[in-house]
Image (cartoon, helix red, strand yellow):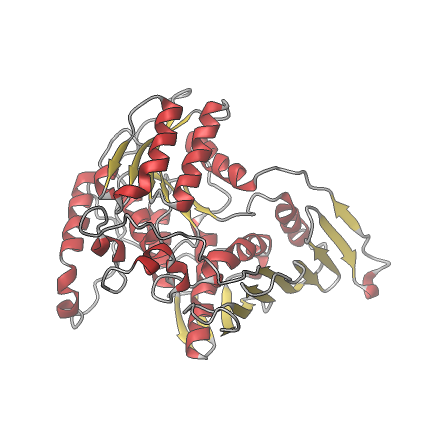
Amino acid sequence: MIPTPPPVQHSGQSRREFLTRTAAMAGAAALVSAAAAKPARPFVAPKAAPRTPLKDGDPIRIGIIGPGGMGTGHCHAFCNFLLKGIENVEVVALADVCDLRWEDAKRAAESATKKKVDTYRDYRQMLERDDIHGVLIATPEHWHSRNAIDAIAAGKDVFCEKPMCLHLDESVELMRVVQANPECVFQVGTQKMQLKKYQEAKKLIEADAIGVPTFSQTSYCRNSMHGEWLYYAIDKRWDPAKNIDWDAWCGSGPKIPWNPEIYARWRRYRDWSTGIIGDLLVHEITPLMMALERVGWPKRVVARGSHLVDKKMENHDQVNIIVEFESGHMMTIAGSTCNEVGVETMIRGHKANLYLADRHCTLRPERLYANDVDPMRVECPDIGNDQDVHRLDWLRCIRSREKPLAGVELGTKVMAVVDMAARSIWEGRAYELDTTTFKARAV
């Protein structure tokens, strides 16, 4: 069961009122240090503005915040859905602090829809539009929570790229906002969530087919010759005096001088990303934690990281994490960008074990239970491009108003692991989560 967070308040405001308020908050950033001495205000979850009606047969009209690498990839996928008759979806607006970022996405969307696609420097102006049903967020992770909360307040459904946020407190606020607005369709864009083997594993675990789940393991390991994320190119045309609002990009992070290396490759830097943990490992952790819903919330995390090969990267190129859940279940996680050989994804139980390394879900009994538990293999279909299936699931839920598979509660569970693991690595201490306050502390 997902614990219910402390009660939230609704501010009962319109879309425009909320956007005006957030603009004022952004403009007041210079006063943060002066206000730091004052007691913190309780978080107030905004009440979403009325949702734009969507009739049967109408196109789902999408806005994309952050049409860079992943954002442009999503745009092309939506355009293909339209052109191939898979889903009636139109990308109608793009928002990015860099004018050059939307060039490719704008061409693709206008070619697919035969309509003009509007572009914005300030995403909040895009959110003021009443003709947009859903917003896809593909900004750097330190912007995810703010983008998503503003979009929900503006009455939009949200697809938020992984990791759901950069920090645990941001994910808790976002969870409260989604829970306070249950009519919102919110999905985290984690890969592998649609693979059927994890859903079959969840059914077997909940049916007690493996007995008590004791220990699970997974990994995301890959290698590079010269360092990870260097394939994000630096465009010599970038110029904060002409085509980039650099201060806006920095957002809630440190206000630093223009740095094209950080702008292009922010995943390498501690202030902007948790590196392997949030960018890569979430793809493996999330579906495994979905299958293991029975074991509860992550309770304690200890992690270590190394700089073995890519010594210029601030984040680590090798990480190892141990997670203890409320039930006592233990999960070990390995991540690497300097060796591509990972560990087999599997879930161990007192009576049997589940093997998830290939497309299927295989159950093998423990030796002591060989006469009581039959081995079995659940054959799972090849679903093709699982990212496309994930995108289509969000679009389907926009039409049906169902809840997507990768919701905000699971996203917050995963962020608890990501946040505590990152802090454990940097501080050399274990971290523990209080599931009544949703705060983590060193132990």
Picture layout, residue 45 above or below residue 167: above
Q: Which residue is drawn at 42% across and 75% down?
A: 426
User: Could you say which is closer to the camera, residue 89 or residue 216?
Assistant: 89
Q: Tell me what residue is drawn at x 52 percent, y 37 percent.
A: 388
Q: Based on the displayed image, in which of its 4 quarters is residue 133 positioned?
A: top left
Any part of residue 401 in sight: no
Q: Where is residue 158 in the image (x, y as percent from the top left)?
A: 37, 41
| Left or right of 375 on screen, residue 206 | left
Position in image of residue 296 (x %, y %): 53, 61
Q: Residue furthest right?
A: 371
At 27% across and 50% down in the image, what residue appears?
A: 238
* Depth check, front residue: 52 or 390: 390
Question: Is 387 left or right of 212, judged from the image as shown?
Answer: left
For this orientation, the residue located farthest to the front is 236
Left or right for 213, reference 441: right
User: Is residue 177 toward the left or the right of residue 312 in the image?
Assistant: left
Q: Residue at x 33, y 49 (%)?
A: 235
Q: Is residue 168 visible?
A: yes
Picture coordinates of residue 198 (x, y %)? 62, 49
Quarter in which the C terminus is drawn: bottom left
Q: How many labels does the image show?
A: 0
Q: In which quarter of the image is residue 441?
A: bottom left
In depth, the one of 241 and 120 nearer the eye is 241
Image vertical order of residue 412 relative to residue 182, above or below? below
